[in-house]
Image (cartoon, grey):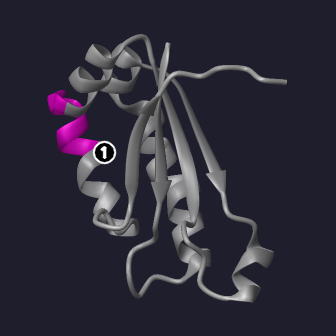
Amino acid sequence: MIKLIVAVKRKAGMNAEDFHRHWRTTHAELVRSNPASARYLRKYIQCHTLPGEYAAGEVAFDGTAELWFDSVGDKDRFYADPDYLAQIRPDESRFADMNGTVFFVTDEETVL
């Protein structure tokens, strides 16, 4: 099992409340209902930056996502799948700054 961790930065000009609402509802439903997700994705978790963090100023990231796959190959197939490309990918740029968002593939190791 591998995890793709995505540190998500919101789109310029979008306030934090609108970003979190869109990500929690519209985008989550697109991922949940997409046939490519059923084929390749084992788990999808969103971690949202707490509202109080914005009081101190601009945050580095507005949240993280964890996408769990059986293999790196399944991750690659998911992102190349026509259903992902047609339905999920276009929505990403509606709420996220894709140039400021960071993707990295990990292998989980439990420490505690």
Is 57 or 10 nearer to us in this picture? 57
Report whether 50 appears left or right of 98.
Answer: right
| Dominant SS type (magenta) | helix
Residue visible at 18% across and 42% down?
86
Q: Which residues are magenta?
A: 80-87
Report whether 8 appears left or right of 17.
Answer: left
x, y percentage for residue 19? 52, 70
Quarter of the rendering occupied by the C terminus: top right
Is 85 or 26 nearer to us in this picture? 85
Tell me the element at label 1.
helix
Does residue 35 lie above or below 12 as drawn?
above
x, y percentage for residue 105? 41, 32
Does residue 42 lie above or below 28 as drawn?
above
Q: Quadrant of residue 12?
A: bottom left
Does residue 44 lie above or below 35 as drawn?
below
Residue visible at 14% across and 31% down?
82
Report whether 80 appears left or right of 27.
Answer: left
How many numbered tags mark residues here?
1
Residue visible at 25% across and 36% down?
84
Task: State the residue lying farthest toward the front.
Answer: 111
x, y percentage for residue 107? 51, 22
Residue visible at 37% across and 13% down?
71
Q: At label 1, which amino acid type do we have?
A: Ile
Does residue 11 lie above or below 79 as drawn?
below
Is 95 within the magenta? no
Give the labeled residue for mark 1: 88
Q: Quadrant of residue 94?
A: bottom left
Classed neighbour count for the residue bearing mark 1: other residues with Cα under 10 Å, few (<14), some (14–19), many (≥20): many
Task: State the residue lying farthest toward the right.
Answer: 112
